[in-house]
Image (spheres, rainbow, N blue to C red):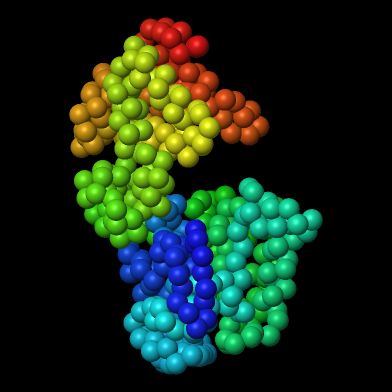
Amino acid sequence: MARAARVGAEDVEDVDPFDPRRNPHLEGFEEAERTVLEAWSGGRFPHAWLITGPKGVGKTTFAYRLARFVLANRGRGNGAGGGLFGENLAPDRLTIPEDSQTFRLVASGGHPDLRSLTRGMLDQAGKPTATIINVYQTRRVVDFTYQTSGISDWRVVVVDAADDFNTSSANAILKALEEPPSRALFLLVSHAPGGLLPTIRSRCRTLKVRALPEDTVASLLRRYRPETAEEEAVALARLSDGSVGRAMAYREAGGLALFEALTHWLSRPDDPDMAQAAALADRVGGKGGEGAFEALRDLFDWWMRRVIRALAVGTDPAPVDAADAAALAAFKRIGDPARVGALRDRALARLAQAAPPANLDRRQVIVALISELQRGTGSGSGTGALRR
């Protein structure tokens, strides 16, 4: 998130370059960009794009990149350069100059023809909605698209993410998608499009984005967090499943140390080192350990899916480190991917108990997880040392 921003005659100061509104750099979206530009230059530009793919690969950054391009251009499908503020817009790219007025207004959140919808916005009572995009804000944004534009030919709405609509807000946005105003563009980001209303999907043109290659994730991680050592960036890229957003979250949560502790424990699932397991439980269960707990949960899920895949296809994945290799060998001895899959499902159900509505203590959830793995892999005993 931006720590401070002053946009106008002055430069943007002290901001996070990873912020999608301000980030001019994007990798892995070449095919999506070509698709958009072909639609634009061919006069077949839709009123709504549904941008789908794994979480954390840059979909929202791409949405703001596209928003800037459209807001800076006059007309639709003319293939011409020359934006509203004199930007030199090449027809083969969506990029506009960082020092242009359009870029700076979007970066500040002050462009009069751009609106965003995201969870955490205020409802009609002035309270933030932490888990959904509320219908009050959605209707206000829909009303905006029917108004006369301020300084551009277009009004643009970025939804991040459409997965956060509830039934009421989804129906509110659907009305605008069914009867779109002239020169209004909706950019819907979705991590799980299968959960959206079929009528929303059918009224958008879909752009599917793939996970990023490991070397791209490592490169982007070092670009956005230059203090990251190269070896750390490579390891985090391997753990992140093609998501630079996930790699950055792991880095901030101490993900490499968490992964090492996790794999040391998983290398002896039926008889874990109780001192190490207790230290891990304390780390994620204490005050301020929410990020570490989320990272541990995601790493555990990634690791278990990797084991299941290895057992199913008979191919060993490249280990991240020695502890990972030992843990993989331990679970390979189980031999049955269905049994490991059932164990994963039960273990993730345990981890989910730290979230609403159960809201169990995170440390006790880790204790329960250890017991679940012991029952599934061996003796089912030995958690007493953690119950202090």
Q: Residue at x 64, y 49 (%)?
A: 130
Residue 295 in view here: yes
Q: Position of residue 44 (x, y in %)?
A: 49, 81
Give the vertical position of 249 relative to 11 (above or below): above
User: Residue pushed farthest right?
Assistant: 125
**Quadrant assignment, res 203:** bottom right
**Quadrant assignment, res 333:** top left
Q: Residue at x 55, y 60 (%)?
A: 160
Q: Residue at x 68, y 85 (%)?
A: 148
Give the vertical position of 252 relative to 270 (above or below): below
Question: Is residue 206 shown left or right of residue 127?
Answer: left
Q: Residue at x 30, y 60 (%)?
A: 223
Question: Is residue 24 shown left or right of residue 119?
Answer: left
**Quadrant assignment, res 198:** bottom right
Give the vertical position of 174 relative to 69 (above or below): above
Give the vertical position of 282 relative to 301 (above or below): above
Q: Position of residue 109 (x, y in %)?
A: 57, 71
Pick the residue in front: 309 or 99: 99
Residue 48 in view here: no
Q: Position of residue 372 (x, y in %)?
A: 46, 17
Pick the residue in front: 255 or 147: 255
Q: Position of residue 307 (x, y in %)?
A: 31, 30
Pick the residue in front: 219 or 144: 219
Image label count: 0
